[in-house]
Amino acid sequence: MKLKLKIWRQNTRKEPGTFISYTMDNVDPEMSMLECLDVLNETLTEKGQEPVAFEHDCREGICGSCGFMINGVAHGPERATTVCQLTMRHFKDGQELVIEPWRAAAFPSIKDLIVDRRAFDHIIESGGYISVSTGQAPDGNTHLVGKEIADRAMDAAACIGCGACVAACPNASAALFTGAKITHLGILPQGKPERDRRALSMVAQMNAEPFGSCTNIGECTAACPKEIPLEVIATMNRDYLYASCSKREDAAATIAPVAEYSANRR
Amino acid sequence: MSATAVGPRQNRAVTFWQSTNGKKVVMAVTGAMMFLFVIGHLLGNLQVFEGPAKINGYSHFLHTIGEVLWIVRITLIVAIILHITATVQLALRSKKARPIGYSRKEAINSSYASRTMYWSGPIVLAFIIFHLLQFTAGYIHPEAAFVEGDVYHNLVSGFSVWWVSAWYIFAITLLGFHLRHGLWSMFQSVGLAHPRHTLVLKNLALLIATLIVLGYISIPISVLLGIVK
């Protein structure tokens, strides 16, 4: 099949980017979107041009490395699919695909389709973990977890941190990501002891990063390749509200946002 | 945006207000207060169908409980100010959060009402100001004299002007859009969501918003059709 790829090319963070169109005559419908870019990059390299930079790792839809906008939709038109799992048969012969990176102040551009997603790492660092003493593995069944809770936690834990929620959100809000992390730990017995502190510090970090604010419109959950439900945002809001009312400790300290120090690094 | 190293003695209410989540809670609570007023006001207005004596009597009753009326008014004004302040601050923040926009962006899941909250809100606010100047203060009352206390006369003469009615119907429809998203969104903001209940809540929000619009616009339509005169 034939395709016209209109791809965002940006050499460095400082240089302005632009769209460049590439025509591909021999796209195998069974290729994935990333394989299609691989083929394009081979031809570009043969011609001595700079290949299109994009992030990828597992190509199985579970690592969260890949992701870009295709025709205005994060990860392309297929629901619950990352771009590495998106096969070209979903497009029409001769179709034009506009491919551009996630756009958010919190995700500064690195090159072409690659953006800096360390803002997510900061949110995880601020509370996306449980504090346990290491040692022997605990006996089985010492923590009883109901099936419903286990399912809800697993649904939230499915988040791969790709950033599609931020990209799809008209406000570039990270509420779905932060909500998923807060929910998946907070509702399990292992995460319960730190539930309040976690909500306070993760929300504080989310707000310290230049993300927008959630307006509950639901674009994120539709773009999410793991279909994280909007409910996790409510869980975050409830945990934050409860923790704000009941907290006894000092306020949470936050880490400097990514946009700032990555700019200073140059 | 710089790193906000929060001081240990920071007031918790201030910290709460400074967070985006806290502001959304404030918006939800103030929105709920305004919604209660919208319901109360509608029930009051619908008395116009029971004749001049009934609605003028109701207006007179409201003025006899002066202090209570002012408590309600001040509460509503504070709610409106908080609601708008939070919105403006969050909107500015969200605008800054995407300095370079997409060349192409599709909405794949959100409702039309939810995407147009920034339009429906300010237009409804402009309408409320006009509406108060017309029917409460009586400064703007085209083509007829405003009579203090004679609510029925003011209402009928006001809505007999076609563009007053048209503007009213337009603004109330936008209020309906605003409520269609706001009524369920407020539950999400304060942390109440459930896969089953939320669906019911969304449908209820649509139903209530539709009923409110129909209830309010029945008045100017009845005046224009000559049912109320």
Image: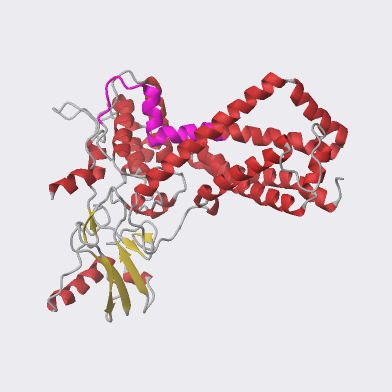
Q: Name above or below for residue B44 compared with residue A46.
A: above
Residue at horizontal 32 percent and vertical 28 percent from the top: A195
* Numbered range of the magenta stretch: B5-31
| Residue B17 belongs to the span the image colors magenta | yes
Q: Is residue A224 left or right of residue B213?
A: left
Please tell me which residue lies in front, B92 or B187.
B92
Q: Can you say which quadrant of the picture contains the N terminus of chain A?
A: bottom left
Q: Name above or below for residue A238 compared with residue B100.
A: above
- Residue B198: image location, x then y, percent: 52, 41
- Residue A130: image location, x then y, percent: 24, 31
Please tell me which residue lies in front, A153 or B131.
B131
Q: Is residue B100 left or right of residue B89?
A: left
**Res A247 quadrant in image:** top left
Please tell me which residue lies in front, B89 or A188.
B89
- Residue A151: image location, x then y, percent: 37, 40
Q: Visible in this render: residue A172?
A: no
Residue at horizontal 39 percent and vertical 75 percent from the top: A92
Residue at horizontal 74 percent and vertical 50 percent from the top: B165
- The chosen color scheme is secondary structure
**Residue occupying the far bottom of the picture:** A25
**Res B179 quadrant in image:** top right
- Residue A61: image location, x then y, percent: 27, 56
Q: Visible in this render: residue A91?
A: yes
Q: Name above or below for residue B184 compared with residue A199.
A: below
Numbered circles on residues, count:
0
| Residue A226 belongs to the span the image colors magenta | no
Q: Is residue A266 left or right of residue A71?
A: left
Question: Main structural element of the magenta stretch: helix, strand or loop?
Answer: helix
